[in-house]
Amino acid sequence: EPLSTTALILEDRPANLPAKPSEETQRHKLEYEEMVAAAKRREMKEAQKKKRQMKERHRQEDIISNAMIVWNNEILPQWDTMKGTRRVRDLWWQGLPPSVRGRVWSLAIGNELNITAELYKIFLCRAKEKWRSYSETSSVNDSESDGGASLADRESSLDLIKLDISRTFPSLFIFQKGGPYHDLLHSVLGAYTCYRPDIGYVQGMSFIAAVLILNLEEAEAFITFANLLNKPCQMAFFRVDHDLMLKYFAAFEIFFEENLPRLFTHFQTNNLTPDLYLIDWIFTLYSRSLPLDVACRVWDVFCRDGEESLFRTGLGILRLYEDVLLQMDFIHIAQFLSRLPDDLHTHTLFNAMAATHMLSRNRRWAQVFCALMKDGGGGNREWGERSSSSSSPALRS
């Protein structure tokens, strides 16, 4: 029997069959040699690709290592004087080294609420008491709740946390029951619902808390989490302040039309309003929609630029996939934006964000939004009328 592919291709035909013509034998030999050459070319191409990837990986590691030294030795020790400089802002845009990311986020978000680690422990103890009381009593009383906004009703959202944690970064298998961060995430979210019973637990909070837990110690994660949710934009969304949310959507559409007029018109034609995709993006600060490493880079810029960057990121995503979205109808656009491609890379998104200009008639985001607030609704009346007739469940809840 033939001992190799070469032997199989080049061997003569069995004796009971006509012999190969010499031309056919030569053709088979040439075909085989071409197959071998093509295989070698593929192997060489793959080896070169791996070499380039390794070289790029080492380059990125060197950049991160050098940046880490700068952040630790030069920027963080003089945070208040350095944070607003052009050099620091440029380094910030390039991405924070993972080893300093949590500390920079914490400093940038601040602690206006003056929360301490001791205060966290107090509310954590209160949450644990609630959990114990729930486990000892029947859940029948919960189902008889009148749905009001009393303290008891809000704090009962402790129960909802358990349902949502299992859906938080499920592919990582670290926040689910039995995972190393399950109890920690449970504690931070439970303490917050007792700290802010007027808000309670809202779906999406688990993703924000999880990202912070991955970058900060437990008490610091809680402090940063509470202060982050206290920012005007997050408070408007998590309290479901319809009027304020409409103004955010109206401001977004002004910059949407300025930057991507064709796609804006396409969305209008299909009656696709911003609430259908922005709510989830804002609720989770893109941590559910984007790959985790990309989301962390988005958080870097959010901590640098504030709420404007959240809407700039949204426009960057729309710019990145503009050609694809222009070919889709309402249903396919909504599905696509709710589950972005897994192969989305940081540099392509940030290139799209860099090409997005947050300037409308010489007014920046804050000025446009402030004008809408002063307008008292007139500036976004048309959008409000369209959104009120839409089928968005988020704004009807």
Image: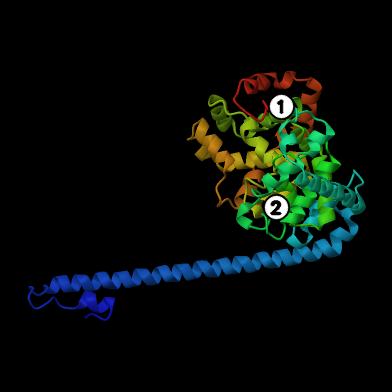
> What residue sits right under mark 2 in the picture?
296
**Vertical relation: 361 (above or below) 304:** above
Task: Return the residue nearer the eye: 260 or 188.
Answer: 188
Please name the residue shown 58% across and 50% down the image. Answer: 344
Is residue 80 toward the left or the right of residue 388 in the image? Answer: right
Q: Position of residue 23 (x, y in %)?
A: 14, 71
Residue 85 in sight from this viewpoint? no
Quadrant of the image occupied by residue 146: top right
Task: Return the residue nearer the eye: 198 or 100.
Answer: 198
Q: Three-letter amino acid code at disc 1?
A: Leu
Q: Disc 2 or 1, which lies upstream in sequence?
A: 1
Question: Callout 2: helix, strand or loop?
Answer: helix
Q: Position of residue 342 (x, y in %)?
A: 56, 51
> What residue sits right under mark 1 in the picture?
246
Question: Callout 1: helix, strand or loop?
Answer: helix
Q: Three-letter amino acid code at disc 2?
A: Cys
Quadrant of the image occupied by residue 305: top right
Residue 8 in sight from this viewpoint? yes
